[in-house]
Image (cartoon, grey):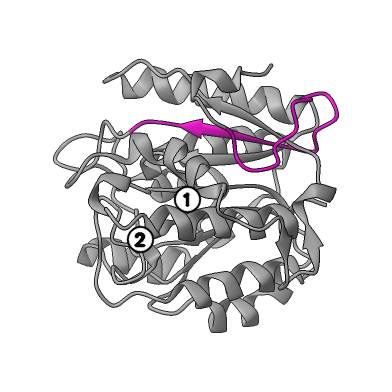
Amino acid sequence: MKLDPAYSGNVFICSSGDYASAKAVIYGMPMDFTVSFRPGSRFGPSRIRQASVGLEEYSPYLDKSILDLTYFDAGDLLLPFGNAARSLEIIHDYVRGLLSDGKFPFGLGGEHLVSWPVIQAVYEKYPDLALVHIDAHADLREQYEGEPLSHSTPIRKAAGLIGGKNIFQFGIRSGSMEEFRFAREETHLYPYDVASPLKSVLPELSRRPVYVTIDIDVLDPSCAPGTGTAEAGGITSRELLEAVHLIAGSDVRVVGCDVVEVAPVYDPTEQTQIVAAKLIREMLLGFVK
């Protein structure tokens, strides 16, 4: 199953036009129906692609070029506006198809709820899955104002599916008291920082299949103001790149990933999508083997 990149009007830099030979598939999930503060992340995937044209193909960090990696940008999934439940079904079925085709799924959000059906699909293939969650927010609510389908709930849902002790959370600096209590008891919580605690955890994840989900708001708003729920006190883009390179240099088996919550309307400088595009280049080169 594949989409036509014409749906989104652009593709990530150096994307191959050949789905069959591609190792990885980039796909957009333009959904922001359940956000609790500022909408706009539905436009994130397209604007990240546009920002990618300013990238060099070569990564001096990894000494690799994306010209040597075959990946396909499928464009954005066509999601029924306002229908979160049906949109999640579409995402799940699409990612299940990618996995069936032997592709590495690389999702662009969209709000963080879109990660939930992806995790479900990946877990179906890898029942010993671990989740690395890099974010400003715990996302461990069972519901938000009575609504269980919320961008504040995906990691709580994942905990119920794969088990909380298979979830490793980094950079978290916001959430309810109940969320932090749950995280301290049920997941592996590493608040505030990312690279340093991640380095100590990676040996524990050795050779395991791991899904990596990154919410751009883990960055300080000074680095990435273009997001729906910006949270002061975050990390720098340099530390986030370091975290990606730590994972890439380990023997962790990354089996899928996403970058979510880029809301470009709040950043007229475009630095948020520029950061996201570079992050995606490094994740492609580091995670796709």
Q: Residue at x 49, y 41 (%)?
A: 50
Q: Residues within 10 Å of mark 1 (few under 14, many from 20)?
A: some
Nearer the observer, 65 or 178? 65
Nearer the observer, 84 or 40? 40
Quadrant assignment, res 4: top right
> How far is mark 1 from mark 2, CA to CA?
21 Å
Does 77 sit left or right of 95 as displayed?
left
Residue type indicated by callout 2: Asp
Residue type indicated by callout 1: Ala
Q: Residues within 10 Å of mark 2 (few under 14, many from 20)?
A: many
**90 to 172, vertically: above or below:** above
Q: Residue at x 23, y 51 (%)?
A: 266
Q: Position of residue 114 (x, y in %)?
A: 43, 36
Nearer the observer, 27 or 193? 27
Q: Position of residue 212 (x, y in %)?
A: 59, 54
**278 to 19, vertically: above or below:** below
Part of the protein shown in magenta: 11-31
Q: Quadrant of the N terminus?
A: top right
Q: Position of residue 98 (x, y in %)?
A: 70, 27
**75 to 170, vertically: above or below:** above
Q: Single out the mark in the foreground, 1 or 2.
A: 2
Find numbered disc 2 in the image and state the secondary structure of the residue it sits on: helix
Q: Which residue is mark 1?
A: 159
Residue occupying the far left of the picture: 145
Q: Residue at x 16, y 36 (%)?
A: 146
